Image (tube, grey):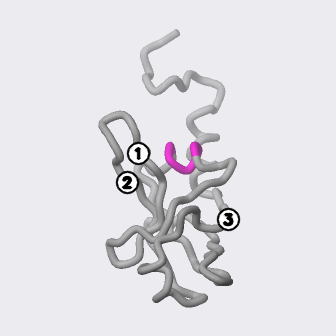
Amino acid sequence: MSGRGGGYDGGGVVTDFVDYCITLVISTQLSSPKDDVVSGLKVGDILQVGLHQISEALSLVVAFSEDQIAGGITSPETNRLKECILQGNNYIAAVTAINDGQVKVKITRLSKE
């Protein structure tokens, strides 16, 4: 195996992963929503998606509203989302519904235009 790094070797895997990051869309609800933050949200608000470092070895994917954590992002695609963020991609979460403190969001990649 040649030394390309990152575990990707030939066969278009790098391109496939880049395409995956560009087209990734996740519809989910915030986990462990922070009441003091989500109480100020409304449908249509845009949250930033990023990593929150818990320890040297652990970081979580979360949604931020004005630099405050609104809640975590959990989905079958969360690990891929985390990898895409680590590769330099930026994502936003649009609030699509709010019901008794439950906040549904649609996560998409922020274009680099």
Q: Characterize the local packing of mark 3: few (<14), some (14-19) or many (20 or more) Cα atoms within 10 angstroms.
A: some
x and y percentages locating residue 28 in the rendered image: 67, 65
Residue drawn 55% across and 50% down? 81
x and y percentages locating residue 95 in the rendered image: 59, 80
Q: Which mark is residue 28?
A: 3
> Is 82 included in the stretch rendered in magenta?
yes
Query: Under tag 1, what secondary structure?
Result: strand
x and y percentages locating residue 89 in the rendered image: 45, 55
Query: Under tag 3, what secondary structure?
Result: strand
Decide: is 47 above or below 79: below
Residue drawn 34% across and 78% down? 66
Q: Distance between the residues labelled 3 and 2?
A: 18 Å
Q: Read off the magenta span.
A: 79-83
The answer, for residue 111, to whether it is visible in the render is no
The answer, for residue 44, to whether it is visible in the render is yes
Disc on the earlier residue, 2 or 1: 2
Residue drawn 55% across and 90% down? 42
Disc on the earlier residue, 3 or 2: 3
Foreground of the two, 43 or 108: 43
Asked whether the beta carbons under mark 2 and mark 1 sit within 8 Å of each other, the answer is: yes
In the rendered image, which residue does mark 1 sit on?
A: 59
In the rendered image, which residue does mark 2 sit on?
A: 52
Label count reads 3
Foreground of the two, 46 or 109: 46
Residue drawn 65% across and 83% down? 100
Query: Under tag 2, what secondary structure?
Result: strand
Foreground of the two, 11 or 5: 5
